[in-house]
Image (cartoon, coloured by chain):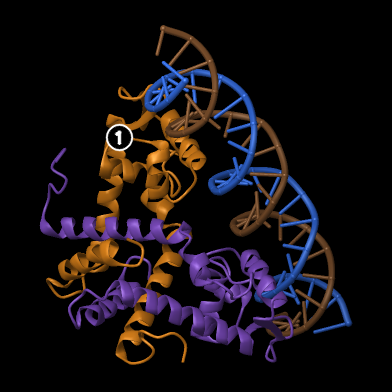
Chain colours: A purple, B orange, C blue, D brown
Amino acid sequence: MRSARYSCGVENEVGHEIADALGILLRRTTRTQLHRQLTEGMGEAVDELTYPVLSALARTGPRSAADLAPDVGVDRSGVTRRASRLEAAGLVRREPDPADGRAHLLVLTEEGQRAVAELRSRLAAHIMSSLSSWPAGEAEAFARRLRRFTVDGPFG
Amino acid sequence: MRSARYSCGVENEVGHEIADALGILLRRTTRTQLHRQLTEGMGEAVDELTYPVLSALARTGPRSAADLAPDVGVDRSGVTRRASRLEAAGLVRREPDPADGRAHLLVLTEEGQRAVAELRSRLAAHIMSSLSSWPAGEAEAFARRLRRFTVDGPFG
DNA sequence: AGAAGTGCGTGCGCCACGCACGCATCTCCG
DNA sequence: CGGAGATGCGTGCGTGGCGCACGCACTTCT
């Protein structure tokens, strides 16, 4: 419309499209009240800040705070603080690392595992319900591509 | 066991996969230093906070701060402050709304348009280079699905 | 053993946020 | 036509999370 937005070849256009879509998704998901809606009745400790900690712990098993800091995307201190809130709520437990007396490992409690499983299910259901209009098999293909993108993509 | 619609089966697994992938992407993109790298030499005003304002303005044309606040994902005051930084840097200009004397419209300056175009190109190139190993046509298909997801998905 | 290195949690200053207020302007109705 | 309520904007204030850097505990190397 205004200028020739895609002045060069097709590859660049694809990149632009992906970049724009990611930008939109990031903005929509970061600050929306969807988090509040999905975490309804799961205790005050579970929110958009603490969930990445729970999720990473569930995915990779017990790890130290510093170890999963780059995964969560904040400083070690940030992980410590978030984990402290989760610990106070009984969702996470601190254990001394048997292999290294200095290290503390963060482990999900029984209740923490339940919480993250429940939240994942809610989110999955929410996503699938909004994709109900897609033809059969499209969602699977998209999921596969998306997961692949998290590995191959610019953020892997 | 819990609620209903996709209690088990393949659909739920797909939803989980999408949910996890989104979570990973969000975390990786929000706080990484990729932003710094991509905004190299574009002035201090362009960062991960102000870019959504620039991007939204480029997508939809001149709008008021309050109007694009939900799009950016923060309060009106937040948009005002971010826009002020961009205005001080000469990337955004405030114009009185001809239709409403109370309203001020945010418009991209010449330099602002250049900045957002440049940044989009850099990001697109970065994405495509990391996807160079994908078979031909896969990236296009993924881009189409992803864009569709921004509309149909749970955040549309 | 003593010294250096590593891992953790915490105090401090900073920055962005949301809320609420004040001012300017528009709109509606008497 | 004029005044009252509604609407839109920007800004001060309190809150909260963040990164940095420090101190302490423990390990490892010489």
Report the residue at 68% width, 71% height from top.
A85
Q: Nearer the viewer, residue B77 or B21?
A: B77
Report the residue at 43% width, 50% height from top.
B48
Q: Quadrant of residue A65?
A: bottom right
Q: Position of residue A66 (x, y in %)?
A: 61, 73
Q: Position of residue B97 (x, y in %)?
A: 34, 25
Q: Position of residue A11 (x, y in %)?
A: 15, 60
Tell me the element at label 1. Answer: loop
Q: Is residue A22 left or right of residue C22?
A: left
- Note whether A9 is above or below B18 in the view shown: above
Look at the image and tell me whether residue B20 can be seen: no
Q: Is residue B153 left or right of residue B47?
A: left
Q: Nearer the viewer, residue A2 or B123?
A: A2
Q: Is residue D7 left or right of residue B148?
A: right
Quadrant into which the N terminus of chain A falls:
top left
Q: Is residue D26 left or right of residue B114?
A: right
**Residue type, numbered disc 1:** Pro
Question: How many other residues sit within 10 Å of disc 1, few (<14), some (14-19) or many (≥20)?
Answer: many
Q: Position of residue B155 (x, y in %)?
A: 36, 63
Report the residue at 30% width, 34% height from top.
B62
The residue to which callout 1 is attached is B62
Quadrant into which the C terminus of chain A falls:
bottom left
